[in-house]
Image (tube, grey):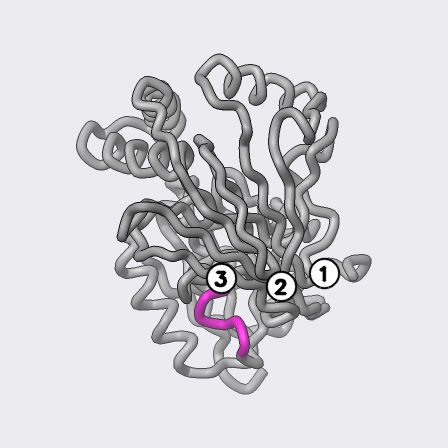
Amino acid sequence: MSADVPVIINAGAGNPHVAKRADALTKQFRAGGITVDVRLASSGDELETLMRAAANEHPPLLIAAGGDGTISTAAGLLAGTQTVLGVLPFGTLNHFAKDLHIPLELEAAVANIIAGNAIEVDVGEVNGRVFINNSSLGLYPDIVRDRKRQETRLGRGKWRSLVWASLAAFRRFPFLNVSIEVDGAKRVYATPLVFVGNNEYGMEEFKIGKRDRIDRGQLSVYIVKRGDRAGLVRLAIQALVGRLRQARDFEALSTTGVVIETRHARILVATDGEAEPMETPLHYRTRPRSLRVLVPRHER
């Protein structure tokens, strides 16, 4: 490539030593024939700034190193453009990378990018905000917001904060009255959780929380029907052991677009592990095959 390829690294994404590995990254890419310009972001605001500046250069390839939130930020800027996204999964969970079988080990992930096999995948969108994995209302955004507060104000680790935030959310148990419009038909629900996925998520045994494809142009909508704390706990246990019963536990819909209304003018919404208030109604849509991403050769 004639110009240096921008590599934007979230220096705090689950790996405290990531900044020290920048030189190793540069050498690995150079050995594979790619000259890179590594840029380290020490905060979320700086990550957004660096990512936007790199995207505005309209490079043929932009490499994002971090967790799902980092990759989601990149996808929001690159969807609908000709720039290809390279993923270095430096985060804790790396759902997007796992679903596309992108290697989690650094050397293999670099080799995947050097190989240059690009495919087109879908992204979801809610009120203009792009997501690569999922978006949700109810319990989960409440947990995400509280977890962030504990990490920032109390200095707790991510997993410890998650446990305390989950317990607090179960005590508050936020409940939603929502109207969900799909294909012109409205349905009304009282639910603790609405989940909207970018394509279909597995709900049985070892496929719980995984996607076989991210290029079918679909949104999967799951509305939890368990109305109390005990029921939700049972649902979580059933999910872990692969014994969800769709008709009794939740309702699932597949669509290309959905409108969700509540009695509130603004509501907390989670997208790819980040929570923010959004104005209602919430307009969800799929953007089929709008993101080009580098994956192993066997991926479709």
Q: Residue at x 53, y 79 (%)?
A: 81
Residue that badge 1 annotates: 216
Q: Earlier in the sequence, mark 1 or mark 2?
A: 2
Q: Residues within 10 Å of mark 2 (few under 14, many from 20)?
A: many
Quick one: which residue is furthest to the top in this view? 230
- Quarter of the image where one finds residue 83: bottom right
Q: Residues within 10 Å of mark 3 (few under 14, many from 20)?
A: many
**Which mark is nearer the camera, 2 or 3?**
3
Query: Is there any visible trace of residue 195 in the rendered image?
Result: yes
Residue 125, which numbered label?
Answer: 3
Q: Residue at x 34, y 25 (%)?
A: 169
Residue that badge 2 annotates: 122
The reply to whether discs 3 and 1 touch (Cβ–Cβ < 8 Å) is no
Q: Main secondary structure of the magenta part?
A: helix
Q: Is residue 79 magenta?
A: yes
The reply to whether discs 1 and 2 touch (Cβ–Cβ < 8 Å) is yes
In the depicted structure, whether residue 103 falls above or below residue 77: above
- Quarter of the image where one finds residue 164: top left
Residue 98, which numbered label?
Answer: none
Quick one: which residue is furthest to the right in this view? 298
Would residue 45 be found to the left or right of residue 207 on screen?
left
Q: Secondary structure at mark 1?
A: loop
Residue 11, percent from left and from top: 36, 50
The part of the chain drawn in magenta is: 75-80
Residue 180, percent from left and from top: 50, 49
